[in-house]
């Protein structure tokens, strides 16, 4: 039994049968987990006494009741399926009355502790049918990272359904930032406005290519973000690890594409597809966005950053129909300011203490580019 003062994880009992039957026949449960509309309290009692009990005896399936810590009312169930030495699959089902209060996150957090600390598992997998944004959002909040989509993986009545697969390793669990799961992060992942997955376009000029980020980018992104220049001039975490890279590639980036908050691309060599850096559009407002870029040391001086910037500005103005782009650079970051100048950005001025760099207010140069502006220097270079 586990308890965090708000919810309790305990064994399911036969006297939970009626509430368990109601939970299993909920419309959302039927839609996303193939529940049965005719699942009765008697069916539930038999299931608890036989299959649930057998799962605990064999250790193959560990299913807990999620109960209110004060009243012991059944709020949902959570389980580890296909448990073996290497890992397990996590599944959760909450009643309609319990949703929206953080109960599901609390239950997941307690089960993660059981899985990695008590059972010593090495990895957990989370499956969500494509379109089940509530499940995917919960997984991201708990610290799982999206690995990809598998077509026709799940049963869906008489058909098959595509599934998102997310993972968390024991190392990921122990490196989870303390902010995961806080309320202010709950809006980071929202379903697309049209209810479909966002499509990341591929942009190329024959030399560099802007594309969707993928697993092959984990190691090169880690090295790029460990570069002293990246630490000095960007907001990447200090002592950047592959876990940070995986959370960025499989968590933050797809979540922001889905919500429309940011559009981040990998900058890759067109011939080899090797990652050179990242570039994206941030802080979208009506008709405007801000450009962010971080190129690896191996690409500097090659013109790759300028080519990536040209592709991104063209995309922003010609495909997204933005009217203005903005560029910030910390004062003394002449490389960033010169790159913006090459792309046609105009220096508008210096804002004192506008940017918090490692917790210190830092002066920034602010530059802008309008859709109608030429995309080459508007005057001679006057910097360092």
Image (cartoon, rainbow, N blue to C red):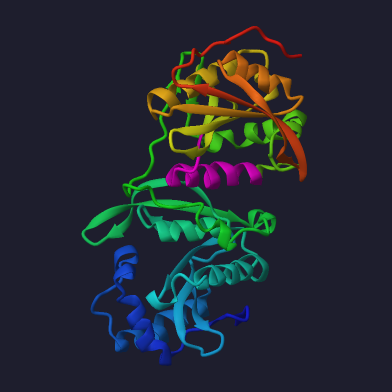
Image quadrant in which the N terminus is located = bottom right
Residue at x-position 51% and y-position 18%: 310
Quadrant position of the C terminus in the picture: top right
Vertically, is 266 above or below 139? above
Q: Is residue 272 visible?
A: no
* In the rendered image, the vertical position of residue 30 relative to residue 189, given as above or below: below
Report the side of 344 relative to 165 (left or right): right
- The residue under the point 53% across, 74% down is 59
What's the magenta bit mostly, secondary-structure-wise? helix
Left or right for 356, reference 60: right
The magenta region covers: 243-264
Residue located 70% across and 23% down the image: 297
Q: Please indicate, yes or no, whether residue 174 appears anywhere in the rendered image.
A: yes
Residue 261 located within the stretch drawn in magenta: yes
Residue 317, located in which quarter of the rendered image? Answer: top left
Q: Is residue 102 above or below residue 189?
A: below
| Furthest-bottom residue in this view | 15
Name the spot of residue 273 as percent of width and height, x first: 52, 23
Question: Where does residue 277 sit, x and y in percent of width and height?
Answer: 60, 27
Q: Is residue 31 magenta?
A: no
Query: Does 35 sit above or below residue 259?
Result: below
Residue 167 vs residue 233, the one in the foreground: 233
Q: Nearer the viewer, residue 226 or 90?
A: 226
The x and y percentages for residue 211 are 47, 29
User: Which residue sits furthest top?
Assistant: 380
Expressed as whole percent of the image width and height from the top left, the position of residue 378 reads 57, 10
In the image shown, does 139 or 365 lie closer to the viewer? Answer: 365
């Amino acid at each position: 039994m586990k308890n965090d003062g708000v919810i309790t994880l305990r064994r399911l009992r036969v006297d939970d049968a009626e509430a368990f039957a109601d939970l299993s026949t909920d419309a959302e449960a039927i839609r996303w987990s193939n529940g049965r509309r005719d699942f009765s309290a008697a069916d539930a009692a038999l299931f608890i006494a036989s299959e649930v009990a057998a799962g605990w005896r064999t250790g193959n399936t560990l299913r807990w009741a999620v109960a209110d810590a004060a009243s012991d009312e059944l709020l949902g169930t959570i389980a580890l399926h296909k448990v073996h030495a290497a890992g397990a699959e996590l599944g959760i089902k909450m009643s309609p009355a319990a949703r929206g209060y953080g109960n599901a996150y609390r239950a997941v957090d307690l089960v993660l502790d059981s899985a990695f600390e008590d059972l010593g598992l090495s990895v957990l997998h989370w499956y969500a049918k494509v379109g089940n944004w509530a499940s995917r959002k919960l997984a991201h909040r708990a610290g799982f990272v999206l690995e990809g989509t598998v077509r026709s993986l799940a049963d869906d009545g008489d058909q098959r359904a595509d599934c998102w697969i997310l993972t968390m390793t024991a190392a990921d669990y122990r490196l989870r930032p303390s902010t995961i799961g806080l309320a202010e992060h709950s809006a980071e992942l929202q379903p697309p406005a049209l209810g479909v997955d966002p499509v990341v376009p591929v942009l190329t000029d024959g030399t560099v290519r802007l594309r969707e980020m993928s697993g092959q980018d984990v190691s090169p992104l880690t090295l790029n973000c460990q570069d002293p220049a990246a630490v000095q001039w960007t907001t990447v975490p200090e002592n950047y690890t592959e876990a940070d890279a995986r959370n960025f590639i499989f968590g933050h980036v797809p979540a922001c594409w889905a919500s429309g908050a940011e559009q981040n691309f990998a900058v890759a060599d067109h011939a080899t597809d090797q990652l050179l850096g990242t570039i994206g559009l941030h802080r979208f407002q009506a008709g405007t966005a801000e450009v962010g870029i971080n190129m690896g040391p191996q690409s500097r001086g090659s013109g790759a950053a300028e080519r990536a910037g040209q592709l991104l500005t063209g995309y922003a103005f010609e495909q997204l129909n933005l009217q203005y782009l903005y560029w910030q650079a910390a004062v003394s970051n002449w490389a960033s300011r010169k790159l913006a100048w090459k792309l046609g950005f105009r220096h508008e001025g210096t804002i004192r203490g506008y940017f918090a760099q490692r917790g210190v207010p830092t002066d920034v140069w602010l530059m802008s580019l309008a859709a109608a502006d030429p995309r080459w220097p508007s005057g001679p270079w006057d910097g360092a």
